[in-house]
Image (cartoon, rainbow, N blue to C red):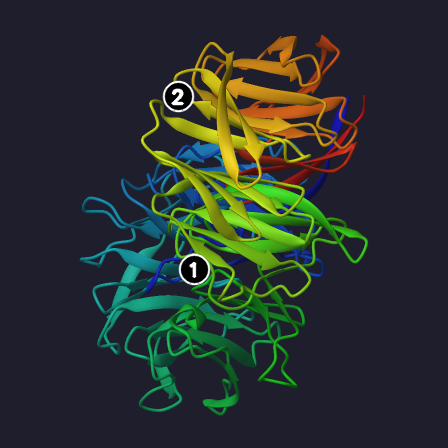
Amino acid sequence: MPYELKHVFASLPQMERGVAKVIGGDPKGNNFLYTNGKCVIIRNIENPAIADIYTEHAHTVTVAKYAPSGYYIASGDASGRIRIWDTTQKEHLLKYEYTPLSGKVKDIAWTEDSKRIAAVGDGREKFGAVFLWDSGSSVGELSGHAKLINSVDIKQTRPYRLALASDDTCGSFFEGPPFKFKFTMREHSQFVNCVRFSPDGNRFVTAGADGQMFLYDGKDGNLISTLGGEKAHKGGIYAISWSPDSSQLISASGDKTVKLWDVGAGTAVTTFNLGSDVTDQQLGCLWQNEHLLTISLSGYINYLDKNNPDRTIRTVKGHSKSIQCVTVHKKDGRPHIYSGSHDGHINYWDAETGENDCFSGNGHSNQVSQMVTNDASELVTCSMDDTLRYTNINKTEYSASDVVKMDFQPKSVSVAAGGLSLAVCIGQVVLLKNKKKVFTMDNLDYEAEVGALHPGGSTAAVGGADGKVRLYSVQGNTLKDEGKTIELTGAITDMAYSNDGAYLALIDDKKVTSVFTVADDYSVKNNFYGHHAKPVTLAWSPDNEHFATGGMDMMVFIWTVSDPDKRIKVPDTHRLHHVSGLAWVDEHTLVTTSHDASIKQWTIKY
């Protein structure tokens, strides 16, 4: 293969305020599972930079759980569909597929022999089902609730018991198989968000939006006690997870804390404070071996330290919303990847280790549309919040002063030597020098889509929706129209000069890729064909011989400037999602980003 997947820096979980997030644990202890969009993300718990992404659901995936055997994963989506797939092969072959519910699946539980599955959530009349994994045949009826069921668990020792937690403020208890309704538990006063049996099966706990937790007998379902008296937390409790030895559990709450409970004593041993911002609400948790993981509303994954409750061991950051743009820059001699997303979030990643963080302070308040780095080690970004920002890469914090307010929304930004930046806005082209606007072109007779400054700073190329590129000459602090244009077949979607300034490459919505020779009066060097749908992003390799394009057809092509037939096709880089950004770490390593909120690196072999 001329290409190989080298790294996957996965997305964070997709979070929603006031909605619990189920994290799946691996019975073998190596991985943990969560969902974002149409993807199930499998991450290594020791080193979360190692990840695998499963993208086979046609709808938003809501929950995924390992079978106790560890060989299969069951994942459920917003349409009520459950897919059961293999974990041992890279291909994750589908074993079985069922649609037990007519609405969103909220939780899944397996019996300890990995033969039966319970799925609960929303639906018409029916909010839960329990069935044989290999035939889909029913093994009981999960009745007794009037509203959607949030949570299900099955006792992992015989005799089997099953418990449910619902929005109708009740829990319920079943014996089986076949599972039969025994009684309703009415201790909660608001939504019941989570129910979990202890690993030894002796007890189970329910947790609710009323901030209360109740402990029940695992075999007969009788109430034993409350945890934490009247109120276990000041806010709603979204998730609970037991310790492997069944003596303790952790609870995650909207009050922005996680508590560790001694279940026998009914008291909290430790309280972890995860912050004071609304995004620090705790919506999910997992206790796996010695790891205590929780998920914040921000999507951040926190590894808690029992011995130091005020500091996490590590916080895994990244993107939870679709990534729109990417660039690469060396920092302290190491290549770093910079990525900007739909919600205005910018992250930076060590290209080798995946260690990552975001800039501190207040940044963009809306989608980051494009980013480049300049000679002054600044990340230059343009956003739908109508600003250009210059952020010092070595300081990694947003500057309050280096923000340029634009008259109109900027779509594209590029930079050149001498402190120049070019911003193409809706209906306006702006030249900036040393972070100040020096020249503005208004009332254009065409719709400007994208701009590129020649690295030497002598020419500003602006691509239009009319299929023309206008070449303006940069003279001092002005742009001069000398009537020079290049004609293409369709609206320009992206363009870039090679790093040495020898070539200008363009893509248009008629699926044509073209390269022009700058020194030869912008004559056509070659045209390249291959995309089946509109190409949207383009990036030059540092070798100035190759460049990559990515399109709505989910394809990435790596082209050779001198030979249009020498191309490398990388299909399905981000399955079911088109590529939104491309960048090169070095001449053999390509970075792709996408609306799946993940970043991948590919080794390219010519």
Q: Residue 603 got which mark?
A: none
What residue is shown at x 20% (from left), y 64% (from top)? 168
* Sequence-wise first label, 2 or 1: 1
The one nearer the camera, 298 or 506, is: 506
The amino acid sitting under disc 2 is: Ala
Residue 176 appears in the rendering: yes
In space, the residues marked 2 and 1 are separated at their CA atoms by 43 Å
Location of the C terminus (image quadrant): top right
The amino acid sitting under disc 1 is: Lys
Q: Nearer the viewer, mark 2 or mark 1?
A: 2
Picture coordinates of residue 314, whole percent (x, y): 64, 69
Total marks shown come to 2
Q: Which residue is mark 2?
A: 465
What residue is shown at x 59% (from left), y 31% (from top)? 93
Picture coordinates of residue 291, whole percent (x, y): 64, 70
Image-based side of 514 in relation to 342, left or right: right
Task: Answer above or below: position of 205 versus 496.
Answer: below
Q: Which residue is mark 1?
A: 21
What residue is shown at x 57% (from left), y 22% (from top)? 555
Image-based side of 503 in relation to 120, left or right: right
**Quarter of the image holding residue 523?**
top right
Disc 2, SS: loop
Disc 1, SS: loop
Pointer 2 and pointer 1: residues touching (CB < 8 Å)? Answer: no
The one nearer the camera, 284 or 563, is: 563
Location of the N terminus (image quadrant): top right
